[in-house]
Amino acid sequence: MNNRHINIAVLEPSQIIYEGLSNIFLKSGQYFQLLRIDTFDELKKYIEKKKLDVIIINPSQIQNKDKEFIALKNDQTDTCWVALVYTFFNQKMLSLFDKTIHITDTPDSIISLINKLNDSNSPNSSAAGHEQLSDREIEVLKLVTAGLSNKEIADKLFISIHTVISHRKNISQKTGIKSQSGLTIYAILNKIIQIEDFSS
Amino acid sequence: MYQTNRKYITPEVKMSDLIFDNSSILLLMEHFGLNFIVHDKTVMQLCEENKISVKVFVSFANLYNGFHLSGEENFSNNDVADIITYLKNSHNYYENEKYPEIKNYIQELYLKNTSPEIKLIDKFFSEYFEEVKEHLSYENRIAFPYFNELLRSGHQKKVDGQKNDFSVDEYSEHHTDIESKLNDLKELLLKYVPVQNDRVLRRKIVVSLFELEYDLNVHSTIEETVLMPLIGKLEKSL
């Protein structure tokens, strides 16, 4: 499945506020996976099972639970914690969060905040740019379609297996195709190999 | 815990409302052997009439609606039979309906567009279908009978022989393969294989692939997160 989407959980008691926020995400034209969570305890349980990229919390939900909150946050270093603020909270409370969304923020600024947070968290995701394969990747792809194993490819190109694997990963990420037989068809369609080369 | 676009299902909901909200629920019902004429009955009523565990049905229906299982459903040994019924019927749907449907489309596609690329796609799909059949038959022949045997032997000591044939790891590796090749096919047809007079047909293929993928996703989630843990528990208790 698409590995670029951002998983967001929202812990916000007001239905109106939640719906408004989710509308902003919906209309951004990007794919966000949004999940509403009702209590802090539910969040704790959920987070054990599934990685979340961003968690948006109304700070009132963690009042008197600072210790628990800090523990959970330190546990989940890959997750961004954002406060959703529309009443007064003291600075000490807000400083527990990575960022703050204020009720008067514009949709654009909210979306760009979330995107920025997520970029800095996953350095690889932005590198996957456009679908052009590099010369080296094309070489590896040819050998893959010829049915060579990673070890054989490594020997042939005088590189480590680790490098072969990382080339293969990039090839799959750029083309969207994982299986050897699928890649073979891709290579033929893109004239990387001739259909005659591919006898079975 | 809920996502935005679909309703979270409870046993008191009318089945017809469910179907109007998400037509894939029809497939879910079929996998449980339920009739489509649902009158005004609720999910609970229909499950009870058909002697299907309400909990199993509702959890699966919520999977179809895009909700994750919370892990607190606490399925019990009594649910295993219903789960296996569901899985077996969906195997039947894959093997005798959905894959052949796509295969026919691809062959029709070749009649319209006799390029060597389509021939390759056809070959890719045929080999893929064979792999899938092999996996389904592995489950039907080895995995399910083993689970049933486990259930039946209940408190008795051991299940001889069969245990060695079954491996949870192998099981989930198969799933990953099946899903990733399906995805490869979508990528090829949408991004790379040139269209020649075949737009309508190709749309039909791609839509079928999406439908199949949707059901397969739910299927493997059920096998891996519901059935396997239950079987693990059963094995330990012996």
Image: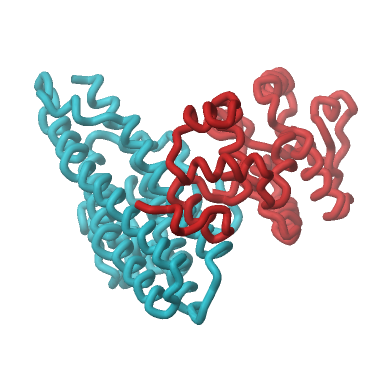
Chain colours: A red, B cyan
- The vertical placement of B78 against B136, above or below, is above
Nearer to the camera, A191 or B47:
A191
How far from the left and from the top, in percent, is residue B179?
42, 48
Q: Nearer the viewer, residue A103 or A152?
A: A152
Asked whether B117 or B187 is in front, the reply is B117
Query: How many marks do you count on the picture?
Result: 0
* Spot occupied by residue A147 in the image (x, y as percentages of width and height): 43, 41
Going by the image, does B200 lie left or right of A66?
Answer: left
Q: Relative to residue B157, is residue B37 depicted above or below?
A: below
Which x, y percent locates residue B121? 42, 62
B12 relative to A48, above or below: below
Q: Dividing the image into 4 quarters, which one contains the N terminus of chain B? A: top right
Above or below B200: residue A163: above
Q: Quadrant of the C terminus of chain B?
A: top left
**Picture quadrant of residue A40:** top right
Q: Is residue B148 left or right of residue A24?
A: left
* Residue B185 appears in the picture as rendered: yes
Residue at left 68%, top 42%?
Answer: A10
Would residue B46 be seen by someone viewing this image from the given angle? no
The answer to which image quadrant residue A117 occupies is: top right
The residue most toward the front is: A196
In the rendered view, does B53 fall on the left or right side of A84? left
**x then y, percent, for residue A143:** 51, 41
Q: Residue at x 23, y 34 (%)?
A: B77
Residue drawn at x 28%, y 34% is B76
Residue visible at 43% across and 62% down? B209
